[in-house]
Image: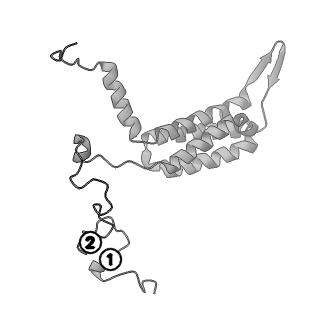
């Protein structure tokens, strides 16, 4: 290839893969996948019949309906983590609780496999936070002129605001409106 060779247009597969990567990066994808995969062994093993030659080993328990309900709820929570990322905290806590309930109800949580997947996925869902959109400087790859990493170049919180109200301060206490947080309890 020479320097004058034009760049090839990306194929359909490359475009779809990049679109999927962008979609996956904007939501707790791996948490949803772990919770979803944790639901399958929990709802499968109580209804499974293992054949060993002419011997049939039935793993059915009296709590088969409870296992089915727990497994279906975990699958629904996993899918909801993909398509409704704003319910991540509720879905994560619910997945953790359902995983804990699956231990006594459904063959030790799907022989511990479903329990671990659901527990890890629920913890990942609770811990996930949406990323900040990249600014124009970060997209262009150019560094800010004073971004050298020296300690005096980055303003501390509260510096450079001139006492103005900051929109991210939800406490309602700032020197600008005269409320500094003292005597606010009574």
Which mark identifies residue 63?
A: none
In the image, is 42 to the left or to the right of 35?
right
- Which residue matches tag 2? 165
Q: Are marks 2 and 1 in contact (CB under 8 Å)?
A: yes
Residue 147: x percent and y percent?
Answer: 27, 53
Between residues 86 and 175, which one lies in front from this camera angle? Answer: 175
- Residue 69 showing in the rendered view: no
Q: Can you see residue 35?
A: yes
Mark 2, other Cα within 10 Å: few <14 / some 14–19 / many ≥20 = some
Residue depicted at x 31% and y 58%: 150
> What residue lies at 31% left-to-right and 25% top-to-bottom?
15
Residue under label 1:
174
| Location of residue 92 in the rendering, given as x and y in whole percent from the top left corner | 54, 48
Q: Nearer the viewer, residue 19 or 86?
A: 19
Horizontal side of 126 relative to 133 (left or right) equals: right
Q: CA distance from mark 2 to mark 1?
A: 7 Å
Relative placement, left or right, of 66 versus 77 is right
- The colour scheme of the drawn protein is one colour
Q: Quadrant of the C terminus?
A: bottom left
Residue pictured at 57% horizontal, 39% vertical: 35
Looking at the image, is 182 positioned above or below residue 100? below
Dot 2: element: loop
Q: How many tags in the picture?
A: 2
Residue 164 position, x and y percent, is 24, 73
**Is 96 rendered above or below residue 71?**
below
- Position of the N terminus, as image quadrant, is top left
Is 56 placed above or below 176 here?
above
Q: Quadrant of residue 154?
A: bottom left
């Amino acid at each position: 290839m020479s320097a004058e060779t034009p760049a090839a247009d990306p194929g359909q597969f490359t475009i779809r893969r990049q679109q999927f990567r962008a979609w996956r990066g904007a939501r707790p994808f791996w948490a949803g996948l772990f919770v979803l995969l944790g639901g399958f062994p929990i709802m499968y093993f109580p209804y499974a019949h293992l054949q060993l030659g002419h011997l049939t080993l039935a793993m059915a328990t009296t709590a088969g309906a409870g296992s089915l309900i727990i497994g279906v709820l975990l699958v629904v929570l996993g899918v909801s983590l993909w398509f409704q990322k704003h319910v991540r905290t509720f879905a994560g806590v619910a997945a953790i609780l359902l995983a804990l309930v699956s231990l006594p109800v459904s063959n030790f949580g799907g022989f511990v496999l479903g329990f671990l997947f659901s527990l890890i996925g629920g913890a990942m869902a609770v811990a996930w936070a949406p990323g900040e959109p990249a600014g124009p400087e970060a997209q262009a790859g150019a560094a800010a002129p004073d971004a050298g990493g020296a300690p005096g170049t980055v303003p501390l919180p509260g510096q450079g605001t001139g006492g103005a109200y900051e929109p991210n301060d939800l406490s309602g206490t700032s020197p600008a409106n005269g409320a500094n947080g003292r005597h606010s309890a009574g």
